[in-house]
């Protein structure tokens, strides 16, 4: 489960526009901590199966429970946005992870496990001696470390820097652009005369907004009537964004874009 979350980060960073600079370091730290916790749990499982004890597994399990609780507390306090479309799914996912972590902890503490360990013929080493132990350690740590390093590298360098910076600016405004597959979409055609609320005086600004003038988009937003087609067109920078930035096109995208 932990390694799957790292794979999802790797896939998202490689296939998308990159990670915004404001989130890049926190993502890297999260990947490293998650991979380390996964490695600890895997080593703990190996030790338990060998009859060498359950200390590593218990330490990793309760660390996992603690991390999930901290994540839930952060999400409830600062990480959740009221308008977030996936609020229910995110909350259910975090709750599921917590329940699975607690179930894992309960299974590791089970009395039957303790009796089985106590009944071992002789105490086992945490890892086999010599080369056998090195092979076990490598079999657990090398794949996890490789995945972690690959994910960190992709997060650090993937994506166009300009696009990533734009995504960072949009993130600070609370605009959700993930549904478009990137921070910018193709411009939409400007309002036509047959659309309700169309006004000839705004047609030149609408055309300029369509061709890339972000100042014209902002002018449309500020000068047109509240709720009409020109305000809506200008607030999304000519249909390039999936949500309104309310007169902030030039600040986010620059004076002109292609």
Image: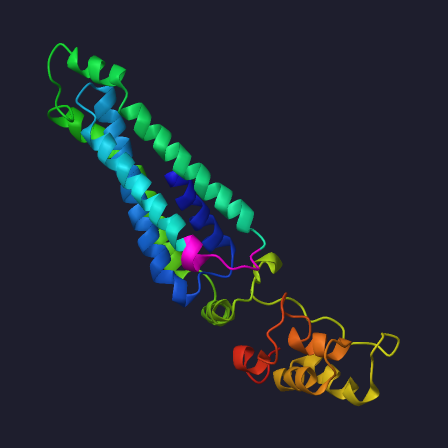
Q: Is residue 148 magenta?
A: no
Q: Please report the residue visible at 51 percent of the width from the left and 61 percent of the height from the top.
A: 17
- The answer to whether residue 139 is seen in the rendering is no
Q: Is residue 124 left or right of residue 254?
A: left
Q: Which residues are magenta?
A: 75-84
Q: Is residue 222 above or below residue 2?
A: below
Query: Percent from the top left, x then y, of residue 227?
Result: 74, 75
- The answer to whether residue 253 is seen in the rendering is yes
Where's the N terminus, which quadrant? top left
Q: Is residue 186 left or right of residue 250?
A: right
Q: Tell me which corner region of the image, top left, top right, bottom left or bottom right, holds residue 192.
A: bottom right
Query: Percent from the top left, x then y, of residue 101?
Result: 36, 34
Query: Percent from the top left, x then y, of residue 37?
Result: 28, 41
- How many numbered marks appear? 0
Q: Is residue 33 above or below residue 100?
A: below
- Residue farthest toward the bottom in the current orientation of the protein: 201
Where's the C terminus, which quadrant? bottom right
Q: Is residue 3 above or below residue 193?
A: above
Q: Please report the residue visible at 25 percent of the width from the left and 20 percent of the height from the top.
A: 49
Q: Is residue 82 magenta?
A: yes
Q: Please report the residue visible at 44 percent of the width from the left and 61 percent of the height from the top.
A: 19
Q: Tell me which corner region of the image, top left, top right, bottom left or bottom right, holds residue 22.
A: bottom left
Choose between 58 and 28: the one closer to the eye.
58
Choose between 91 and 186: the one closer to the eye.
91
Q: Is residue 223 left or right of residue 105?
A: right
Query: Percent from the top left, x then y, of residue 134?
Result: 17, 30
Q: Is residue 252 left or right of residue 238?
A: left
Q: Please report the residue visible at 62 percent of the width from the left and 67 percent of the height from the top.
A: 243
- Residue farthest toward the right in the current orientation of the protein: 194
Q: How is the image coloured?
A: rainbow
Q: Is residue 248 above or below residue 156?
A: below
């Amino acid at each position: 489960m932990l390694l799957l979350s790292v794979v999802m980060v790797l896939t998202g960073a490689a296939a998308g526009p990159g990670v915004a600079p404001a989130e890049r370091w926190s993502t890297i730290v999260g990947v490293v901590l998650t991979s380390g916790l996964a490695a600890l749990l895997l080593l703990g499982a190996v030790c338990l199966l060998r009859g060498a004890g359950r200390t590593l597994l218990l330490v990793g399990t309760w660390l996992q429970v603690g991390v999930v609780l901290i994540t839930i507390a952060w999400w409830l306090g600062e990480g959740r946005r009221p308008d977030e479309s996936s609020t229910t799914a995110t909350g259910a996912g975090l709750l599921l992870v917590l329940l699975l972590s607690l179930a894992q902890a309960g299974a590791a503490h089970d009395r039957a496990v303790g009796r089985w360990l106590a009944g071992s013929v002789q105490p086992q080493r945490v890892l086999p001696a010599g080369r056998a132990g090195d092979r076990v350690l490598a079999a657990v740590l090398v794949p996890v470390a490789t995945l972690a390093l690959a994910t960190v590298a992709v997060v650090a360098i993937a994506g166009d820097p300009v696009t990533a910076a734009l995504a960072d600016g949009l993130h600070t405004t609370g605009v959700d652009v993930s549904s478009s597959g990137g921070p910018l979409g193709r411009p939409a055609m400007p309002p036509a005369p047959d659309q309700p609320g169309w006004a000839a005086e705004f047609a030149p600004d609408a055309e300029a907004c369509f061709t890339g003038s972000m100042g014209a988009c902002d002018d449309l937003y500020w000068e047109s009537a509240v709720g009409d087609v020109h305000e809506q067109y200008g607030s999304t920078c000519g249909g390039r964004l999936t949500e309104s930035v309310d007169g902030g096109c030039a600040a986010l995208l620059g004076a002109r874009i292609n």
